[in-house]
């Protein structure tokens, strides 16, 4: 991969404004795994904070940070049934810390003055009796329910496929599915009765009566309502935005790696990439959709901070499929194109309501330039297979992926490690092996097939979207 932008004068502008937020302060950091925390550790050191205390879900994939000042405690429970379960377990543990973690935290921060930085999707009301730095009001959290998305799309005048919200019973689901199916099936998405859902864990592609019967029991068990939408063939994509007090900064659409589990109705969210970009007319149209949506979120809920608009780019144009009223994983991929820009911390400050002269237009231009100049892409997923922390280069050729020989040019980097499910893998891909128009979904599916054979990850056969 090409090197990221460095020593940017504009990035320095934001660092100077954000430094006083953390300089000289103790910081409690909860942003996922220990390896996920590496970039944060560098940033906090550079901005002058005291060495932080980390509450992590697991060690994570790749080489873990070390050093005499590193202090952390794993609080996520092992043995979660799936990736979403691991995230929820981590969030619950942060809200009700194990006694050993609570004692260590109180020893680090006896006066409870530390800055508590928690990613939005992990954030409980409090962490060890301390309020997060950028809390999310209840009205924002209610927007997590997938049943509210179509109302927001309509208010923002976004193009969308026909959908129906029905009770999670056989009769309503089957009737709505028959009505909306145009030959390729329909997609069922469950509500948030059991808390927020993400990563396509509550999404099913229903194409037959047999599919419907196999999915009914799941949705009856976990949901009260289900959104039924016509299946859309095309390129899954997502665009990030940040809602400020008077403006909305919008970045560009990125590819979502949403793979199809062959032989079942499930999907697997497995990464994202910025090698692909929609053709210019679609790119600007989708950015305009996100800008309008950000305005609706601000007007209806007083929303501030990061959000995503997900959709499918079809042969007939873009169609909205999802809203996340929080930042998504693609923001970390975007941030890797310009690590000197403290993008996540900036988003937290906006969510907090701090007026730091953010200059949304300048930020938007800076991020767009960085994404296009230094794109990134890769796949990742948790697996029930226990894996040790490590990294190995991969080569790619006509026969697919293989472990690279010593001294051979690497086409990808495989990182592995433990997770709350068992193990986790991350495959960073070089742009030269991307597929048509820079898409990486097919390559991620090939990499996971290789890992099933060589490592025993047990992902099973996965197919990429088909988009002409």
Image (cartoon, helix red, strand yellow):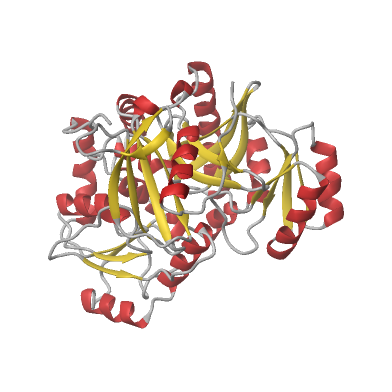
Q: For this rendering, which residue is in front, 137 or 214?
A: 214
Residue displayed at 17% across by 63% down: 51
Q: Based on the displayed image, in which of its 4 quarters is residue 249 positioned? A: top left
Residue displayed at 80% across by 37% down: 180
Label total for image: 0
Taking the image as shown, residue 300 lies to the left or right of residue 31, namely: right
- Could you say where residue 105 lies in the image, as x and y percent from the top left? 28, 75
Residue displayed at 15% across by 54% down: 48
Residue 95 visible to an observer of this rendering: yes
Taking the image as shown, residue 285 lies to the left or right of residue 158, namely: left
- Rendered view: 278 above or below 59: above
- Could you say where residue 128 lies in the image, as x and y percent from the top left? 36, 75
- Rendered view: 442 above or below 214: above
Q: For this rendering, which residue is in front, 21 or 52?
A: 52
Give the quarter of the figure containing the N terminus: top left
Q: For this rendering, which residue is in front, 410 or 257?
A: 410
Give the quarter of the figure containing the C terminus: top right
- Could you say where residue 141 lies in the image, as x and y percent from the top left? 54, 56
Residue lying furthest left: 68
Taking the image as shown, residue 237 lies to the left or right of residue 409, namely: right
Residue 135 visible to an observer of this rendering: no
- Could you say where residue 78 lies in the image, as x and y percent from the top left? 44, 70
Residue displayed at 19% across by 31% down: 8
């Amino acid at each position: 991969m090409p090197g990221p932008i460095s020593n940017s004068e504009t990035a320095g502008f934001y660092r100077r404004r954000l430094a006083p937020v953390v300089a000289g302060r103790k910081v409690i950091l909860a942003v996922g795994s220990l390896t996920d925390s590496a970039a944060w550790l560098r940033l906090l050191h550079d901005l002058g904070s005291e060495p932080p205390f980390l509450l992590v879900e697991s060690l994570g994939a790749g080489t873990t940070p070390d050093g005499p000042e590193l202090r952390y405690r794993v609080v996520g429970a092992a043995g979660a049934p799936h990736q979403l379960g691991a995230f929820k377990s981590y969030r619950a543990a942060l809200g009700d810390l194990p006694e050993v973690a609570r004692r260590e935290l109180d020893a680090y921060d006896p006066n409870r003055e530390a800055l508590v930085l928690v990613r939005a999707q992990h954030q409980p009301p409090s962490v060890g009796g301390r309020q997060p730095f950028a809390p999310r009001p209840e009205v924002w959290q209610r927007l997590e329910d997938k049943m509210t998305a179509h109302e927001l799309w309509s208010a923002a005048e976004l193009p969308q496929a026909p959908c129906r919200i029905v009770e999670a019973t056989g009769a309503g689901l089957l009737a709505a599915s028959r009505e909306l199916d145009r030959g390729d099936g329909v997609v069922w998405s469950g509500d948030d009765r059991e808390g927020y859902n993400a990563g396509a864990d509550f999404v099913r592609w229903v194409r037959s009566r047999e599919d419907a019967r196999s999915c009914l029991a799941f949705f009856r068990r976990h949901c009260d309502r289900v959104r039924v939408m016509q299946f859309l063939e095309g390129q899954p994509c997502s665009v990030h935005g940040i809602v400020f007090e008077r403006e909305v900064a919008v970045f560009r659409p990125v590819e979502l790696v949403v793979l199809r589990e062959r032989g079942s109705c499930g999907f697997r969210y497995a990464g994202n990439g910025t090698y692909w970009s929609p053709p210019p007319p679609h790119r600007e149209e989708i950015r305009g959709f996100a800008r309008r949506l950000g305005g609706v979120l601000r007007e209806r809920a007083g929303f501030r901070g990061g959000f995503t608009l997900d959709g499918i780019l079809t042969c007939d144009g873009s169609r909205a499929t999802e809203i996340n009223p929080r930042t998504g994983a693609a923001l970390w991929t975007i941030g890797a194109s310009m690590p000197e820009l403290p993008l996540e911390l900036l988003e937290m400050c906006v969510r907090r309501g701090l007026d730091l002269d953010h200059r949304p237009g300048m930020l938007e231009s800076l991020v767009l330039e960085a994404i296009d100049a230094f794109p990134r892409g890769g796949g990742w997923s948790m697996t029930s297979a226990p894996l040790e922390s490590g990294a190995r280069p991969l080569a790619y050729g006509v026969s697919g992926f293989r472990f690279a020989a010593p001294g051979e040019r690497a086409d990808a980097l495989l990182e592995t490690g433990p997770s709350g499910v068992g193990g986790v893998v991350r495959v960073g891909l070089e742009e030269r092996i991307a597929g048509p128009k820079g898409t990486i979904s097919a390559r991620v599916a090939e990499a996971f097939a290789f890992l099933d054979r060589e490592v025993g990850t047990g992902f099973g056969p996965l197919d990429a979207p088909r988009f002409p």
